[in-house]
Each structure stands twice: as structure tokens, then as C-alpha cells.
Amino acid sequence: MIPNNNNNYNDEVANDENEGPLKKGPWTPDEDAILSAYVKRFGEGNWNLVQRNSGLSRCGKSCRLRWANHLRPNLKKGTFSEEEERIVVDLHAKIGNKWSQMATQLPGRTDNEIKNFWNTRLKRCQRESLPIYPLAVLREAALYHKLEQQYYEQQTYNMPPLSVLSRLYPNSKPNVSNYYSAAAVNPAPLQNQLLDSGSNFYTIPSLNLPSPPISLFAGSLSSNSSDVFNNNNQSLSFGATAAHHGFAAGGGTDSLFDFQYSGSLSFNHGINNNGDSMIPPLIQSSGGSSSQSLPDSSLTPVSSHNSGGVDGFMGASSMVSNEFFEVAPFSSPQGNSGLLDAVLLGGQSLSERNKPRSEDSTSAAARTTSRKRKSMVVEENAEGNTSVVPVAVESALMNTGETSRSPDDENIDIDKLLDAIEPHIFDKTISWDEPDDDLPSLLDDFPLEMPLSDWYQGVEIQSPGIETQPHAPPPSGPTDEVSMTFWNLLEQHG
DNA sequence: AAGTCAAGCAACCGCGGGTCT
DNA sequence: CAGACCCGCGGTTGCTTGACT
């Protein structure tokens, strides 16, 4: 593009630092040369110093943008290849408008370039009534979002990210489906029981049953445990995980089984033992002709978070083969999506259900982030096997005085509870030295081909969002019920 | 040839998180 | 601890270009 110095972009903005007015608008070759020379000499960063040190009448922001999008080396220009387009579409179906994240998967492409490419492509698709996402991508993304949703609804966000698991278990490559699937869902009648990493049930002694609707991790994993889904003893399995209805006040503060898991366990996994997908059929909106329904209410995310995608992200209806389909989106209020967002929103919604309305939601999200990162300890045993164990919260719980509240009690001060608990957790735990958002590694582990399976249709999947009688007294044989659910699944699909 | 319109692209803007002072 | 500063991100704007009438 030939720079035009006569457009109104080129307004000069007063600079109050006596360094002359700041120029706006298209960059000239001379300016590019000055900026390139500057970066070559001083390196990237400190963009606001560019103006002072080079005489360039551009603000730091403008310099950074110009360098990042046009001047830095190894930039790939020109039209997107088919492979690049495939990657963009695939990523967008999963993570929405996370342009910078996409850029990390497309060497030489900038976030701005990808964004422009997507917007152009989106308009073209809409103009020509073409599907924004290929059906295969839609299905794959549907599974992705289902797992993502399970991930947060089960409150398993206290588990380490897959990248950490990979490090802990270098000989195994955690499968994202099994990673999620092994998490227990929808606790209800199981009391005094924990399912360990070897699928064994343990009885927790000395129960004290608080029941605030709070979720804490209560699981374990070990490197020599067997994976109950694929019998691969190099893989991981998780025992009891989320506790929707309270946590244990067990014995010692460092005991592995200090948590009480008050709920039934069912296993809700995206991939069956044959490797077939459990992706639900697409649901057709009112605009369509045939009727399909979702067998699993859990596929419908929290409604208040479904702002939909203004940009054609899966939250919005999209054209597929001339019919409108909706698939389970998980979209943040900003219209984006991603594992981190899901985690944050999950924690946020959890907190917001129990907090005064006056609290700023961002603080809840921030606290959730913190909680997510800090509620496990990693131990290494004598054999060098690493296990992740929950930390005790009993004493913290006791300190709150919230030990006998009903989960439906709207007056529970959940924040007070969490605030009391968290310091105790933090004292004993480590932070994962991984970035919060390990989506790239997640995507690396994500299977690319996810054929739909008829087998899925007949399987009842409990919604983790629907809690089964939290106040009901535990059945006499909770273990049996859990085992039945679990082993029936194994028998049916194994 | 001139006008119109849409696509593509570059750049700006506001905002938020992190760091520094 | 608060404010300033830096940086990056995503949304938006507006210019250029080329196709079409």
C-alpha cells in the first residue's frame, strides 16, 4: 500500500513532553528504516523510548505495532495457504477470537493478519452462504467444548495442566479425553468413599460433613496406576475428584483422604473404549427442518455466559450444508473461548452463585485463577513415582464456622469460606510453573479425527451441572452404586 | 472514463494485566 | 500501597485497490 500522507490518519497529536508532535497514520519507508535500525541496535521492548532516542515522531504503541506486524524478521506475507486456513478454522472453532494464540501456531503470521484473514473469510462465507466451519471441525470442536465444560463444571481445574502431567509422566502421553473422563462427575450418594487412582474405593474415617456447595479437588494420581479405560498402565487415571457438596474433615491435615466425596460417581468421557467419539449430535435450531436433540443437558453451557460469537465463533449459529446448527459453545462474555476462560468462568459462576451481588466479578475470577493454580501438592515417593495429592482443609473449614450448612442455603458466605480455606491450601502447595493457559499443549493432545459413534446415542450421561439430591441421605451402598455406574460403562464399552 | 461498491489491509483505540517506583 | 508506566490483546476505523456498472 502506498502511504498517503494527506489522509486524516496523519493527524499529529500533541506531545506534552516537548519532543514534538506524534505522527499518526501510515508509516513511510524512512520511518521504517529508523525503527528497524533502532530495534537492531537496542532490541525490542521499551517502545516508548524509541521516540526519545531515535527522533521518530511515533508513540511507543505505534512503534511496537509496526515492528510486530511489518518489520520484524521472518514474517510471512501473502495469502494464506490451505493448510494455514485449516489451522485457523480449526483453532477458531475451539478457542474463538484468540488471535495471538492462533499466531503462535502459525509461524510468520501475526495476530492482526490472522484476524483480518478471519474477518474477511467470515464475510465471504456469510455472503456466499458457506459454512464457516466444516462439519468435521464442528464435531471436533463440540467435543472440545464438551470436555472443556466438563473440565470446569467438575471443578477439576485444580488438576495440573496436561503439560505438567506430561512432565510428571514422561513415558505417557496423556490423552485429553481420558484426562477428563477419569474425573468423577456429579457427586451424590457416595459418602466416606474415595476412588483412588487404581480404581479402588477407600473409606474415609472420621467424617465431618459440611455441605457448602464448594468444590475442591480430592483426587490422586500415580504413575503406576492403570488406566481403566484403555488398560494402558502408562496412562493416567484419576480417582475421586470434584466434591460438589462439601469436602472432608478427615483425620490428619496431610492425609491423602482428608476429603469427603459426597456424591455418586459416573464416568462421563468423550471417547469410548473403542476410540469412538461420544460427540453428541448437533442440535438444530428452529430454522432447520429436521429435529435433533441433545441427549445431555450438560452440553448446554451456562446460559448467562453464552453471548455468542459476533464473529462467527461457534457460539453463534453457523451455516452447515445450508442448515443452521448449533453446537455446544462455551463463550466468555467477551465472545471468546478457551480453556482458561472456561476455568475462570466456572470458578466465577461457582462463586457468584453464593456471593453478594455487589462484588466485582473480576475479583472472583482473579481469585479463582489463584485457586486453580494452588490447590495440589506434588509428592515423590521412594520409587521416584510422583503423585499429586490434595491438601487438607479441615482446619480452615473449622475456622469458618460453616461446617453444617446446607448446600442450598443461599446465605452461605462462600467467599468467607474460601478466604479462610485458601491460606491453608497455599501454605502447602506449589504453583505449576506452566503458563495458565496451556491450550497449545491441549491442542497437541487433541485427536484430530472424531467420528461420530452410534454407540453414544444410547448412553445416558449425567449432567455435572445437575446435582442429584444433595440433601438426600446417602444410600446404604454407595460404593455399589458407583461401581455399577462405572463398571457398567466399562463392560458396555470395553 | 467516471462513479460506485466491496474486499483487503494497516493502523488506531480502549482496556486490562503486569511491573516499577 | 497507590499511581505511573509498559506492553499486549482484541475490536474498530478508515484508506487503498480493484471489479463492476
Image (cartoon, coloured by chain):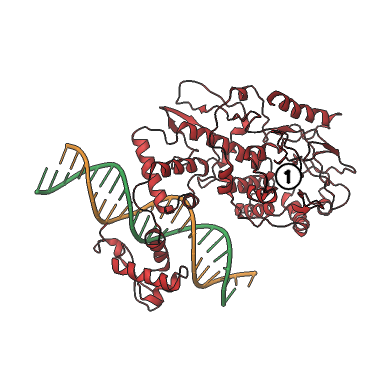
Chain colours: A red, B green, C orange
Would you place residue A29 above or below residue A172 in this image?
Answer: below
Residue A109 drawn at (x, y percent): 42, 52
Q: Nearer the viewer, residue A102 or A56?
A: A102
Relative to A109, residue A50 above or below: below
Going by the numbered disc 1, the residue's amino acid type is Ser
The C terminus of chain A lies in quadrant: top right
Query: Is residue A88 among what the camera can see?
Result: yes
Residue A192 in sight from this viewpoint? no
Q: Residue at x 86, y 47 (%)?
A: A250
Where residue A330 sits, quadrant-wise, is top right
Residue A260: x and y, percent? 82, 42
Q: Position of residue A23 (x, y in %)?
A: 33, 68
Please tell me which residue lies in front, A125 or A364.
Answer: A125
Q: Chain of mark 1?
A: A
Residue A476, percent from left and from top: 87, 29
- What is the secondary structure assignment of the residue under circle 1? loop
Seen as rendered, the residue at the extreme bottom is A18
Residue found 87% across the figure and 41% down from its top:
A204
Q: Nearer the viewer, residue A404 or B5?
A: B5
Q: Could you classify mark 1 by the number of other residues whose Cα lies within 10 Å: few (under 14), some (14-19), or many (20 or more)?
A: many
Report the number of discs. Answer: 1
Q: Which residue in the protein does label 1 denote?
A: A215
Q: Residue at x 41, y 70 (%)?
A: A40
Q: Quadrant of the N terminus of chain A?
A: bottom left
Residue extending farthest to the right is: A206
Horizontally, residue A238 falls left or right of residue A174, namely: right
